[in-house]
Amino acid sequence: YYDSIPEDLVNAFVAIEDRRFWEHNGIDVQGIARAFIKGLKSGDFDEGASTLTQQLIKNNMFNGGMETSFGAKLERKLQEQYLALQLTKSMDRKLILTNYLNTINLGNNTLGVKAAALRYFDKDVSDLTLSEATVIAGITQNPSRLNPISGQEANAEKRKVILQYMFEQGYISKDQQEEALADDVYDRIQMVDNVSK
């Protein structure tokens, strides 16, 4: 199944969610340190630093991480980190990524990138363009606010950030970035949504 996922879609998720996914051992020590320092400065320790592996574990074993107290959240984070280390030792990264992409909430009652490709673009996931891939990758951090139908403006802003990250991380060229930004992708989503309704 991994081979049917477009490279641009994989790269979009890695660029925005976990830029060191292919190198780290399941936890991103640099990301944790960055989030901790940011938390000390702001007093807000909600910055993620969760790897894609940790997010997969959180979504499938910890009910999406719905704890209300800091202590419960910290305990879950530590368990997540331990399990992420173990999972990375025993499972191929492509399989981890495939499982993550197949189970994430992407708004409008869609779970996984295959369902999202059909829901928003009426096409198979393997046929997504760079522009469409970045729309879908832009949903995951907040599926209700970044929904490309009801939260089009917020999704468009996130999409710009993803395309910039992809360019900076060497996944796409400047021409590809500009071509994707020029695509009127939200008109196509609106048409598909009208047909769905």
Image: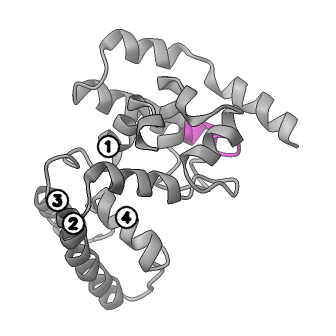
Residue drawn at 38 percent across, 35 percent down = 162
Residue 47 visible, this orientation: no
x, y percent for residue 56: 39, 64
Give the residue number, with chain letter if any, for mark 3: 28
**Kind of residue indicated by mark 3:** Asp
Mark 2 and mark 3: span between their CA atoms?
18 Å
**Kind of residue indicated by mark 4:** Gln
Crowding at mark 4 (Cα within 10 Å: few <14, some 14-19, many 20+): many
**Kind of residue indicated by mark 1:** Val
Residue drawn at 33 percent across, 86 percent down = 70
Magenta residues? 148-155
Crowding at mark 2 (Cα within 10 Å: few <14, some 14-19, many 20+): few
Query: Label 3's element?
Result: loop
Residue drawn at 28 percent across, 71 percent down = 45
x, y percent for residue 140: 49, 52
Colouring convention used in this rendered image of the protein: one colour
